[in-house]
């Protein structure tokens, strides 16, 4: 996966300032930050749900193995 360096970020920011204009650039940064934050929360929730499902599945398997041993 390619990495993005500071120079590339500077170029993208300069182009964004030229295209959007200096007045709208901070507003767009705020929107992008909000989108990134909500995306991170969404991904974190999905990871937590998958982890909980895995833990529940592991617990069920453990209980089933215990019942088989008790028989």
Image: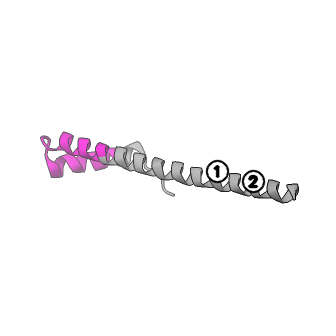
Which structural element holds mark 2?
helix
Q: Is residue 7 inside the magenta stretch?
A: no
- In the image, the segment drawn in magenta is 9-34
In the image, 50: left or right of 39?
Answer: right
Query: Which percent across, then down, holds residue 19?
Result: 16, 52
Mark on residue 63? 2
For this rendering, which residue is in front, 46 or 34?
A: 46
For this rendering, which residue is in front, 22 or 57?
A: 57
Query: For the C terminus, which image quadrant?
Result: bottom right
- Circle 1 sits on which residue? 55
Residue positioned 48% across, 53% down in the render: 46
Name the colour scheme.
Answer: one colour
Q: Is residue 17 inside the magenta stretch?
A: yes
Find residue 34 and report its image quarter: top left
In the image, 17: left or right of 71?
Answer: left
* Magenta stretch prevailing secondary structure: helix
Residue positioned 45% across, 51% down in the render: 43
Query: Which percent across, then down, holds residue 65?
Result: 80, 57
Residue positioned 39% across, 42% down in the render: 6
Residue positioned 14% across, 41% down in the render: 22
In the image, 34: left or right of 65?
Answer: left
Q: How far apart in space, not on screen, are marks 2 and 1 (Cα)?
A: 12 Å
Which structural element holds mark 1?
helix
Q: Residues within 10 Å of mark 1 (few under 14, many from 20)?
A: few
Query: Which percent across, then down, holds residue 1?
Result: 51, 58
First-in-chain label (2 vs 1): 1
For this rendering, which residue is in front, 69 or 9?
A: 69
For this rendering, which residue is in front, 5 or 46?
A: 46
């Amino acid at each position: 996966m390619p990495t993005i360096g500071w120079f590339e970020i500077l170029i993208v920011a300069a182009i964004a300032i030229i295209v959007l204009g200096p007045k709208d650039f901070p507003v767009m940064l705020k929107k992008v930050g909000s989108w990134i934050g909500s995306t991170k929360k969404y991904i974190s929730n999905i990871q937590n749900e998958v982890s909980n499902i895995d833990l529940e599945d592991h617990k069920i398997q453990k209980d089933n193995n215990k019942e088989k041993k008790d028989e």
